[in-house]
Amino acid sequence: MSRMNNPGGERGNEDGRSEVLRRADAGAAAWRGVVHAQQAATPDHGEFYELAGFMVETLRALEALAGVLSRQATGYADGLSVGRVVYDDTRAVDPRIRLETARMELSSLVQSAAWADGYANQFWSAIGHIGVEDAPAAPQVSR
């Protein structure tokens, strides 16, 4: 990901990234690892159930993050330090319009994450009713 035009965030660590970005990167990498591991795993309804819980928790966190970013984007242009201004990298669009577009997209993401959370919760509930037991023995045929 290019950070040329987006150098923000608090630094002070070895890679120059903020704690926010390091945590987001670790979370995304962790979920990629989960997908990879699950592709090779033997399907197990107990793990489906636990994964569903983690998906719900993650979707709720993403919904909350999108809400925070939406609020922050709303006043971003006005909150910069004296002598700094926002710009659009095309120089053809008013950056305040671009920020409003970004805010609206984040609002849509908040709603979509809430919907996805609902579906994940329904999956979590449904898979929670699944169990596995030994099949009954076949009846003996007498002759």
Image (spheres, rainbow, N blue to C red):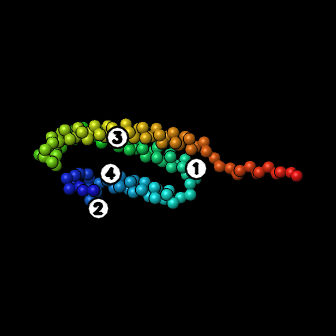
Which one is in front in this view, the residue at disc 1 or the one at disc 4?
A: 1
Question: CB of mark 2 within 8 Å of CB of mark 1?
Answer: no
Secondary structure at numbered mark 2: loop
Residue 19 percent across, percent down from the top left: 32, 54
Asked if one can make out residue 67 in the rendered structure from this viewpoint, the answer is: no
- Three-letter amino acid code at the position of disc 3: Leu
For disc 4, the marked residue is: 20
| Cα–Cα gap, marks 2 and 1 | 40 Å
Amino acid type, mark 4: Val
Q: Which residue is mark 1?
A: 45
Kindly identify which residue carries mark 2: 15
Give the mark, 4 or 2, whose residue is nearer the N terminus.
2
Q: Secondary structure at mark 3?
A: helix
Q: Which mark is residue 109?
A: 3
Q: Amino acid at mark 2?
A: Asp
How many C-alpha atoms fall within 10 Å of the one at disc 3: few (<14), some, or many (≥20)? Answer: some
